[in-house]
Each structure stands twice: as C-alpha cells, then as structure tokens.
Image: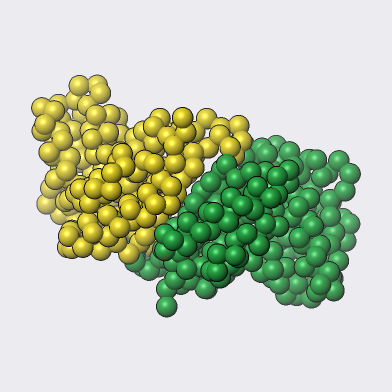
Chain colours: A green, B yellow
Amino acid sequence: MAKVLGVLGGMGPAATVAFLARVQALTPAKGDADHIRIIADINPKVPDRNRQPDAAESVLGQMAMRLRDAGAQVLAMPCNTAHAQAAGISKVGLPFIDMIAETTEAALGNGAKKVGVLATPGGEALYTRTLQAKGSKIVRLTGPDRETFMACVYAVKRGDTGEAPRAEMRRLAAALVGAGAEVVIAGCTEVPLLLGTEDVSVPLVDSAEVLAQTCVRVCG
Amino acid sequence: MAKVLGVLGGMGPAATVAFLARVQALTPAKGDADHIRIIADINPKVPDRNRQPDAAESVLGQMAMRLRDAGAQVLAMPCNTAHAQAAGISKVGLPFIDMIAETTEAALGNGAKKVGVLATPGGEALYTRTLQAKGSKIVRLTGPDRETFMACVYAVKRGDTGEAPRAEMRRLAAALVGAGAEVVIAGCTEVPLLLGTEDVSVPLVDSAEVLAQTCVRVCG
C-alpha cells in the first residue's frame, strides 16, 4: 500500500533536491501516478546542528509535526548530521527512516571490519556509535583533512560543485582507503554531489542513495 | 522580507524537481540560509486535469489548504495545464503566482505579435486567452504534431529524456517557427527537460524558468 513520504529537507537545499530526484529515479514508473507522493519541507533555516542542537531539535520537531498534519505517513531526513536530533522528530509518532542505521547496515553487508566515513564531526560521532555496536571500526579523516572536508561541504552549499572540490573529495576518500578502509561511507548528503562510485577504489556506500532506496521500498 | 513558498507539484514529478533545482540555481546564495524555504507537495496522484477537471480542482484546493496550514505564504504550481483549476487554489486566500500570466508577459516583452506555444490542449486554451487579451496571436501545433507532442510529454513522465523525444521536440518547435512564430513558449513543464534555448532559432520562453524567477523575486 503506497504511503505518503514526508521529507525534512533543506540541510542543504541542493542535497535535498538531489535526493528527491534519486527517489524518483529509483521508482519503477511508467507514468506520474506510479510515483510516491512526497511532501517536502525544504527549510534552509534550521538552526545550526552543531552550534545550536536544542534549537535545531525543536525546529525539526515542528517541521515533522506539520508534515504529519499535511498528510505524511512516513518521515525521512536526507541529512546525516541532523540525525543527532532525531528524538525531536520521532516524538510526533510517525515511522522515521533512520539514515545512519540503514547506511551502516548497507556498508557492513560484505563483512567489512574497517569502514571509512566522510562526514561532519557530528555525523562521524553517529557512525562511530552504530559501527562499534556492530563490531566494526570507523576510519576517519584526521588533521587538516577534516577542515578540507568541511570546506568541500560549504563549497556545495554555495553552489560550487566544480573540479576543485571534486578533486579534494577524491583525495579525502583515498586517504581513508590508505588508512585501511575496506569500504567508504558518503556520510554527508553533500558528498555525492562531488564524489561517485567511480572515484573510489573500494565500494562507496552513499547514504543518500541508501535512504532513497529505503524510502522507495517502504512507501512504494 | 523572506516568504515561505508553497509548491503544488507532482504534475509531473520530474518537472517539479527540475523546477525546485531551478529556483535554487536562480537564488543568489553563499550558503544554506540564503535560500528560500519551500514546502512542496509532490503529488503525482492529482486526478487527470483533462478528464476529471472538477476532481482535480478539489484535490488542488486541498493541497493548497494543507500547504497554507503547514506555513506556506505564497503558492506556485509548476504545471501549466493545471492552471485551468487555479480557482480551487486561489480560494484558500494566499497569493498564487500565475504561471500563464507571467509567461505571457515575458513572451510579449519584445512586442511579438505571433507567439508559438508548445503545450497540452488545456495549456493551449489558457495561453490563447491571455495572448488574445494582449492583442497577440497564438501559433499552435496542428494535425499529427499534437499527438507527437503529447507522446514526448509522456516519454518524460516515464523517465525517457533521451535523444528520440528531444529530436521530436526540436522538430515541433521548428514547425511553430515555420508557421510564423516570432517567439516560442515552452508552455508545459516537461518541455524544458527536452528542449533548450540553443535548440530553437527564435527566443524560447520557458514557463518553468519564468515561474522560478518570479518565485525568487516574490519570496527572496
């Protein structure tokens, strides 16, 4: 039975639109009516998840409530970092698809013990917890590479998906592989706007793709 | 003062996502927070606008009401044909940006007297009215070209934006120019997924682009 998907978006806006396009691309459809109905709140003004976590949680809770009242039956949020505030969303009583849990499961599918993660500090903390719970180890960016990663994310957020941030993101993924990662998680929804599976020498598990697949399975 | 934009979408789904991407591309932004907040109801199950106009109007009215209650302050609908049901939307009391009126104005900016329109039969009827009211004449597809046009639209709706429908759409645009059109309106939001300004020998006025520009101006 088809379900209406509510999307808490805008973190960032380009990543959300790419996610919506991906859900459509993954939906087997011969015409409009075969697609999932999606109500998306693309809110680029959610308070900073790192600096104002409580304010962010409260705004995300309000967004979830409004999506529910507008008819959403299942919720998803194409932003890894904001999953630290998932409690505010779950409170509204709808099933919430957990991007971190789904992506972790997909990354460990082939029995990887060392998993590279391209994520913000907040996203890294979430993946550290889920990977450890499954007996695997996170391989993370270190030293100046962490700042370079954030600079790439902010490049996407100001509309720059050109060759310079792409080259940096490829280098960061290679650094994780060099440090022993058997698989790399694109654990920030801006990453796939710069990096594809063809750019990494080990399997790349894209959190946005995993979330889109799960949404199609649950709501289709 | 920034306003929350409510989007009545899903007619079709790919056209709506392309429209959302276009609004973002047209927004001068250095980071997430510079973007417009958009609440989009991407509903691919709106009853057929040609065959069940009353049912469609009722559903569009409900969507508009829910978008309003979810926080939208201005409404827009990236589907030309469905503007025949605009009365159901306007009833909810929010400003509704009229895509047909805005596109007509943009197309007549350079004083064109004969305006080609690539649209569904319903969309053509709307443009005929607005163009005539301004003293200009519509140039429309005739004979089997009308069916070819609809076949191209349905190709997009089933995910085919390949060279075959693109070539057909270029040919249809050329047919309008051959019949005297001084400017061509892409009057169906599926058209720009197949046809660009570089494909037409006279100015191409894309209704989705015009609507996106107006949304940025009104809500930014």
Quarter of the image containing the N terminus of chain A?
bottom left
**Quadrant assignment, res B59:** bottom left
Rendering coords of residue B219 (x, y %): 42, 34
Depth check: give the residue in front, A164 or A34: A34
Rendering coords of residue B178 (x, y %): 18, 36
Identify the residue shown where x is 44% and y is 71%.
A3
Identify the residue shown where x is 69% and y is 64%.
A100
Rendering coords of residue A149 (x, y %): 76, 44
Rendering coords of residue B213 (x, y %): 39, 33
| Position of residue B113 in the picture relative to residue A78 (left or right) | left
Identify the residue shown where x is 22% and y is 26%.
B108
Depth check: give the residue in front, A161 or A68: A68
Depth check: give the residue in front, A196 or A113: A113
Residue B120 in view, yes or no:
no
- For this orientation, the residue located farthest to the bottom is A1
Compared with A114, A174 (above or below) is above
